[in-house]
Every structure is written in structure tokens, then in C-alpha cells.
Image (cartoon, rainbow, N blue to C red):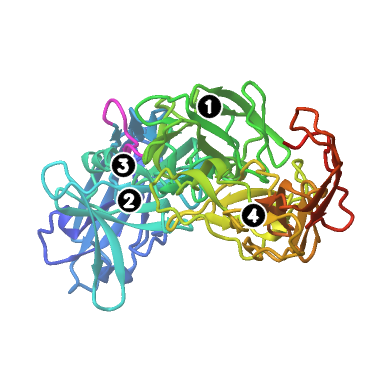
Amino acid sequence: MLLNAAEIFAETDLENIYPINIGGYSQPIATDGLTADLYLADDSLYNYVYDISLFDDHIIKFKATEPGLYTFNAFLWDLLWDENIPVKEYVVEINVTADTALLINDLDGDSVSFVEDSLIQCFLDSGIKATVSSSSSWNGGSLKLEFASGLVNDEDSIAFNNTGNGTGSIYVGYTDNGLGISDNYVKYEGVVIGTFSKTLGSSGNVIAMSLNFNTNATNAAVSALLQNLYYTNYNYHDPNNGLRTVKYSLTDGISNTATALVDITVVPVNEAPELGGADIVFLEADGSVVLGNDIELFDPELSAGNGNYAGAFLTVLRDGGADDTDIFSAKSAGTLGILTEKGALITNGINIGDVTQNSGGVLILTFNSNATNELMLSTIRQIAYSNQASVLPDSLLLNMVFNDGNDGSQGTGGALADSVLIGVNIIIPNKAPVVSEVSVTGIAKIGEQFTGNYVYTDAENDEDASTFKWYRSSDAMGNDKTEISGANTKTYTLTAADANRYISFVVMSAALTGTNTGTTMESELKGPITKRTQEPIIYNSTGITKTYGDVVFIPTPPSGGSGKGLFRFVSKNPAIASVEALTGKVSIHKAGTVTLTVIKEGDNEYESALQTCELVVNPKTITVSSITIEDKLYDATSNAQIKSVILSGIMENDEVIPDTSYSCF
């Protein structure tokens, strides 16, 4: 067993009665025969003979290796005497008792926990306060602290807890003597008990310390020191998890040593994921929009390195409750596969989970171990949204929620989630105008005006700015349909080119403002188009009276009518009177009444037209120039037989046969 060392005594310890110095000593001998040695101040062995050089050396060191009562003589000389005879012999007794072992109590085997994000300081002394016990002085002793295992060089750190200069307090400071020599010192109750040095990690963290005690150090001081050491982590928000062990190596003033090991468990705490980058998106009605081109997702545990998101899930639904008009799909022409409910979730050709739900206005995607942070972001940024409501709102909010699905593997605290609201402003585009009930009214005759009719409808009541076209077809089937040049209003006057054709009206709906291109609709064909009716022909409207035998005559020429057709003349009874077709010259052939007709031929615009007049041919008067009566014998009657009659006024080629059967009287 190691004993007390460096027991020091000096001249004053030997009752310096005389003004003399110690001149020599005998070798200390214990009662049981054990011996000890004396040393000079420079730690050289004293040779136990008179040595004048000792006269100036007042300090002798006594060192024993075993306990016992040691006795030796100190010889005193008067420095004025020349004789080698001591004037005084002084008996010195030193009782060396057995030293007690250096002990560290209630520290070795302690285990403490550093909980991520909860504590910055984690005291290494837990439970019953640690103490030390040593019967030796602490002067020259030391305390070394280091990580025996589990050290993370840029995170783990040990330090003193400064509690001030009061009773039982530890205070750590720094002093500079002005000569470039400085020390880190430790105080106990305001008194410096030693100095220390530090070994730093790559982040400036303290990974080891060595303390050297002075004569002021006591058991109480060293005990207080052990009680005020703590562990902290420079990456306390996201430390490396696992076990660290700190080793205490304590040495007292006579080199007794003791060690202690304290385990530090760094306990992870599951931290909530961070979902951000959401913005307002604009959805055009009848279209779809990607919800999160700039969505960002970070999970302290799952995003580390290229970690995976197994068990995590993403939910998207209407804020305030699901709405089944909300439709979720994959971005068109992207790398996200079709989001079929209960089907695999495929991104970039990799199965990263499944589509747990995609119905009723709710989308839930659950991820597997293939879901890296990169693939997660790629997936979220390709979710598209559309709305099937018959009447769309102006805007709505969607709630996107990411749940990390923590089952304990990410740390304590259970599953955590974060959410973002995505504003959807719905752009209801100005709807195109619509035309219906397109038709044509009017008389289907050249010169008449057709009117195009239609019903114009615009959801926003934008003013009608529709344009029009008219088409001409050769038959009722619409064959040979051609646009009529210049016909671009709602009305169209039929021309000669339309004769026997079929006409249709086309409306190209447009609005003066908003969306100005709408539907185009064509009317049914209307036709065939007939020629125009000529103006009335005036042709001897009061009739003509002639007498048989009158010369050939030309009635008053006809007037009126329309178009470029020629007048032609016709007699209904040429036997009474004939007429030349082109000149209208009338020749009377006999008495009677006949209808004369004048016809104005039609042209490419006008139908033919006619007019009639009545020609009355009165008989011509025939005069009896003479009558010859046959001779008669009076027979008592007045009758006489006509023998011959001579008539005048008979027209050439007329054959007149007088009736002579009558009797004259």
C-alpha cells in the first residue's frame, strides 16, 4: 500500500532553541527494524554523515515506504565552534500510518441521457452526488477526462458548470499574468484549487480535459468538481444517436489513482417534418394545374443523406373537408405514373409506395423504402388538380399534409406532421358566344331580300359582334356550294345568279369583348330561287274594235314589263285575226272577237309576262246594188221570184250567196 509521501520538516520543527543549524541526522529506524530515508531539498539522498554543506540547507525530506514509528537523531552544532562535537542531540519521531485508498464514490457506472433538442447541459453525475475520499493531500494530483468510446469528434463536448464563488461552488476562469503566461483555473468557494488544459474537437468542442490540483484542493473541492461536470452536444438539434462513455482518471498527491466510467445515451427525438413552398395556383376551368412546382419537404430524420420515407404518407384534400368534385391526377407528360387507387405509386419508373386513396376528393399516397428525398419531392411536385363542379367557385383552399409515420425508429414523440394550404384561384374563362336557330326568311325570288335570323347567347352578356356569310348551292343537297362574294350582312338581295339555286345563311358567332370566337352555324338551304315578276304590261287595255275589211294595222305597241326579253304577239284565233309575232301587225280575216296576247319573254332575271286585249271585228256592210225579179203573171199574190241580186262591198275571196228564196212583196 502506498504511504504518505513527502513529509517535510525544517529547523523550526525541531524546536530551534539555539542559534545554530542542523548539522546532521542519523538514519530513521522504526521500532520493528524498518528503515526510512532522508532526502535533501533537491531530492538527492542524504548520506547520514556530517556535512558542512548542510548548514545552509534547512529542509530535509523524510520518505517512508511502510507505516511505522520511525526514530532518528538530529545533531545541532554551534557554528562558532571548531570541534566536531554537536552541542545538542535531538530525537525525532515520525509515526507513519497506513494510507487509505483513493475512492470515487457514486459515479462509476452512472448512466445519463442527453435528449435531442430538450437539454443543452447534461450533468454527468446523476442520482446520488459523487464524492471522493483520500487521506492524502491533493497537491500535485490530477483529474483527466476523456471519451473512452463513442466519441463524435465534431459534436461531443464536456465542460464545467460555473456556479459562482459561494459555498460549495465551482467557478472556472482564465488568468493572464501579463507576461504571456496564462492559465485556465478552477476555483472552489472562490479559492483556486488548480489549473486545467483542454483538447478540442473539430467544432471547437472540448473532447478531453486535464486538471492539475494545488495545495488548496481538498476532498470537498474535488467532489464538488465531479458534481459540476456536464456533457453537451454541439449538434444538439440533430446529434448522432448512440452511446458515449466518459472516463474519469483521478490521481491524488501521492499518486493513488481511481477511475470511473459514465455512459451517455444520446436519445433522438422525432422532429416534425417541414413542408413549405406552397403558393397560389391558377386553374382554368375544364383544365388541370400542378399544385406544387415549388413545394419543399424536409424531415430531420428521413431527409438525412438520401434516407428513405418508408411508412410516411401524404394526404391532399379540400381544407375544411373533402369535396368529391376535387380530382387529383398526375402531371401531364411528367414522370409520375397514373394515380390509380390501390395501385402502385410509380415515380421515375420506380415503385416508391402505393396510392392508398384517390376518390371522394381525397388523395393519400403511402411511401415505401424506395422513396428517397429526391423521389418524394419529384412526386409531390407532379400532383395535378382539377375540379368537376358544374358551377365552379372563384377560389378554394387545398390542405396538403405530410405525416412522417414515425413508429419509434425516428425517435421518441410519435408520428408528426406538417401541412401547407394551397390556394387555388379558378379562372373561369370568358365563354365563347353561341348561336342557334339559324334560319332564312323571305320570298325565294330574284330581287327579293332574304333575312338571316339567329339566336345569340353569351354567358357574360358580351355584345354581339358576329359575322355572316351567304352561300349558293346548285341543289337542295348543298352540292357545288360557293360563298357569295360581298354577301356579309344579315340580309341578302337575290340576284339573277341565284336563279334556280339554293341559298344558305352562315353565322360565325363572335363577341365584341371577352372570348370573341364562338361557334359557327348554317341555316337550312332555301330555294329554289325563282325569277322576278315583271312589271305589268300595258297593251290596249280598252280593247280594239275593227270592221271586217279594214286594212292591216299595228295596235298601240305594248309598254311596261321588265328585263331584256322581247315582246312577242299571239292571236288566240288566227282565223279571225292573225298577228305577226315580232311586229304585232294584225291582219283581219273575218268578223268576230279574238284575243290578242303580247308576251314579254323572260331573261335570266325575270319570268316571262303577258298581257291580252280583245279585238272585235265587226261585219262589213254589203250593199244590194240591184235585184232582178222574174216576170210574173198576176196570181192574186204579192210574191215574186228574185231572179238575180247584185251586191257591192264584198271583200276579195269572200263568197256571198244571196238567199233568193224569199218573195218580194
Q: Identify residue type, mark 2.
A: Ala
Amino acid residing under circle 1: Ile
**Secondary structure beneath disc 3?**
loop
Q: Secondary structure at mark 1?
A: strand
Earlier along the polypeptide chain: callout 4 or callout 3?
3
Judge the density around disc 2: few (<14), some (14-19), many (≥20) Cα neighbours within 10 Å. Answer: some
Mark 4 and mark 3 residues within 8 Å of each other at the beta carbon: no
Does residue 221 appear in the picture of this structure? yes
Q: Which residues are magenta?
A: 117-129
Q: Which is in the foreground here, disc 3 or disc 2?
A: 3
> In front here: 206 or 100?
206
The amino acid on which the numbered mark 3 sits, given as a three-letter code, is: Gln
Residue beneath label 2, please? 6
Disc 4 residue crowd, few under 14, some 14–19, many 20+, Cα 10 Å: few
- Tell which tag, 1 or 2, sits nearer the viewer: 1
Q: Report the disc number at residue 121.
A: 3
Question: Which residue is found at the position 66% from the left and 66% from the top?
Answer: 557
How far, Cα to Cα, is label 4 from label 3? Answer: 144 Å
Q: Is residue 118 magenta?
A: yes
Question: Which residue is labeled 1 in the image?
Answer: 364
Q: What is the quadrant of the C terminus in the image?
A: top right
User: Which of disc 3 and disc 1 is earlier in sequence?
Assistant: 3
